[in-house]
Image (tube, grey):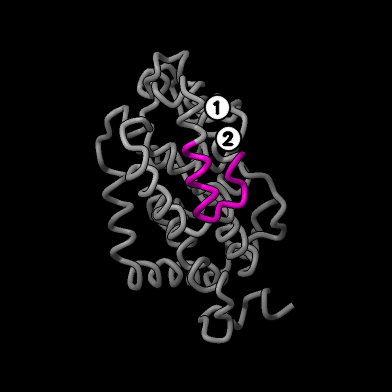
Amino acid sequence: MLISSLKLKNSDSLFNLNNVIKYSLNNHKEEITEYLFLFDKVMSATRKWFEFIYCILAGIQVRTSTVKKVYEILFEKIGYDLILLKISKSRRIADKIQKILKSNGYRFYSSKTETILNTARFFKDYKHNPDNFINNYHNYKDLRNELITIKGIGFKIASHWLRNIGVEIPIIDNHVKNLLYYTGIIKNRKNSYIEFENLIIELARILNIKIFLLDLSIWIFGRENCANNKCLSCFLKDLCLKINL
């Protein structure tokens, strides 16, 4: 089993998760409010496409500050040419994107650019309109299964985009996996994306909290503490496997 029944029955585990949530809400209120606003916002089809570009840039193991900076530079340097129809038909625009990614320190600037281009071309079958794609399917799992057929798009990027356009699902990244492992809630970090997703959904139900607020709180805590090795000052240090193995 992915979830340790013993741990979930132990009130200490849930208490510690509640403290993680409180930490993020108290110390990163502005950031969380920004995400809440994005989640509740009604988006145009063009805005949904721009969100997809952001999610592709975020990908895996890229600092949020780098993503935001490069995202802003893309619009500053390329602007209107970033609309879906133009990117899908122009290698020249893709080359501009690649140049900007490369000059701003992206390790995989070429593959990121190709993923943006592949995704833009994917929407050709939906008249270059993300809304037509979304309205063609009945649930997020069907939407995501289609999205991951795009070369360069995996479960995380697809889920990130769907969440950012209003679908209440978690985003599972290394910060989330690590914290769940370090606190002993899971036994193995190598479980599938779907297993982690189901775990977060179940924990949100038990804790009576919105799914995206739970995984966002865990992600922020992991980013600020675990990733920066703040182990000795962390309130989880007595049970954390990272420092007690």
Which amino acid type corresponds to the residue marked 1 in the rendered image?
A: Asn
Residue at image x 50%, y 54%? 104
Q: Which residue does the image show at 47% across and 46% down from the upper left?
A: 100
Mark nearest the camera among 2 and 1 is 1
Residue 186 lies left or right of residue 146; in this view the side is right
Q: Residue at x 45, y 69 (%)?
A: 20
Asked if residue 103 is positioned above or below residue 160 in the image, the reply reads below
Q: Is residue 152 above or below residue 206?
A: above
Q: CA distance from mark 2 to mark 1?
A: 9 Å
Q: Residues within 10 Å of mark 1 (few under 14, many from 20)?
A: some
Tags 2 and 1 in contact by the CB under 8 Å rule?
Answer: yes
Residue that carries the numbered disc 1 in the rendered image: 118
Mark with earlier residue (2, 1) = 1
> Bounds of the magenta span?
96-110
Q: Quadrant of residue 207?
A: bottom left
Position of 147 relative to 18 (above/below): above
Give how far across and how far down residue 117 sits, in percent: 52, 29
Mark seen at residue 167: none
Foreground residue among 168 and 84: 84
Tell me residue 13's x, y (percent): 55, 69
* Residue in the picture at 54% in, 37% down: 113
Q: Main secondary structure of the magenta part?
A: helix
- 156 in the magenta segment: no
Residue 38 screen position, x and y as percent = 30, 46
Task: Locate residue 9, reporting x and y percent.
Answer: 58, 63
Residue sitting farthest toward the right: 245
**In front of the other: 118 or 55:** 118
Looking at the rendered structure, which numbered label has been put on residue 153? 2
Residue at the farthest bottom position: 232
Q: Amino acid at mark 2?
A: Ile
Q: Quadrant of the C terminus?
A: bottom right
Q: Residues within 10 Å of mark 2 (few under 14, many from 20)?
A: many
